[in-house]
Amino acid sequence: MPRLSIVAISRNEERDLPGMIENFLSWADELVLVDDGSTDLTLEIARAAGPRVVIVESARSPDEGFGSQRNKGIDAATGDWCLHVDVDMRASPELAAEIVAAIQNDDSDAYHFGLRHYFLNRPLLHGGVQHWEKPWLVRRGLGRFEGAVHEVLAVDAPSARVAHLAEPMWHLGDADFVERLEKNVRYSALESDRAIAGGRRASLFGAVLRGVAATYACYVRHGGYRDGRYGFFWALYVFAGTINRELMLYDRQEPAARESLEAELRRRMRAALGQGALRPAARPG
């Protein structure tokens, strides 16, 4: 029976990690967790789960992205196959059974699977998420990740040996909208870093156009309207997220220091006091 390693990256995942451990270690051989400097109870929860959870403590350096973190998990895994997931992903019993059968098949070296995506704890079946596919089940040694953000697994196998799983992986997403906004901040920072490295300047007009185009594609072209009001909410978030990324890039390229505002106010206050426009406050004591 081939051994299966579940590989994931984490940072402050105390809310989702217990459910992940329970879900995957009920049928897989080990969980490799690459932790990016968690400051909550993530590491304590992982250690308490026992020796089948392999912890790699490795905070990302400024020039590292998510792809390099996932590759550290591949290097630490011992299974014949690696199933790459996020901490908020879960396998249904049907998907777990399909994976166990798939890794015993000598005809394939990797498998794509779709995602059953949730937003605000409601399923989204349209809006573009129905097209999200990941070849994240691969024989160890035949796949490495590329990219800092929205990383891609490059599979070293001919397309004829990459198959598809019928059952989707559940992507639970964010527990609430606050968590969604926190992730948007992190992703926007990484995207702006990549834009600066590539020499791209911020364009607020271009951001609005991209936001409108992305929202139209999400809500109309990909049928987000079929998901009712939560499909509409998701489309609004797509628009706002696009604007947020561009504003963060603009702020980094055209910074204005808070200290300059303090200095200006200090200068004006001293001038007002010197002209007698204000009565100096009595010194204590």
Image (cartoon, rainbow, N blue to C red):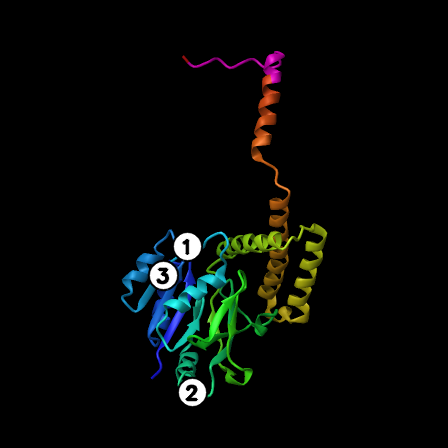
Image quadrant assignment for residue 231: bottom right
Quarter occupied by the C terminus? top left
Secondary structure beneath dot 1 equals loop
In the image, what residue type sits under mark 3? Val
Gap between marks 3 and 1, in whole Å? 9 Å
- Magenta segment, which residues? 271-284
What residue appears at the point 62 percent right and 59 percent down from the top-left corner? 236
Between 86 and 232, the one lying in front of the other is 86
Q: Which mark is residue 56?
A: 3
Q: Which mark is residue 77?
A: none
Q: Position of residue 192 (x, y in %)?
A: 59, 53
Quarter occupied by the N terminus? bottom left
Using a 10 Å C-alpha cutoff, classify the residue at mark 1 as few (fewer than 14 neighbours), some (14 to 19) or many (20 or more). Answer: some
Nearest to N terminus: mark 2 or mark 3: 3
Secondary structure beneath dot 3 equals strand
What residue appears at the point 51 percent right and 80 percent down from the top-left corner? 157
Q: Which mark is residue 59?
A: 1
Gap between marks 2 and 3, in whole Å? 30 Å
Nearest to N terminus: mark 2 or mark 1: 1
What residue appears at the point 37 percent right and 76 percent down from the top-left corner? 4
Q: What residue sits right under mark 2 in the picture?
A: 105
Q: Does 214 sit above or below residue 143?
A: above
Q: Does 271 sit above or below residue 127?
A: above
Between 130 and 43, the one lying in front of the other is 43
Q: Is residue 222 magenta?
A: no
Secondary structure beneath dot 2 equals loop
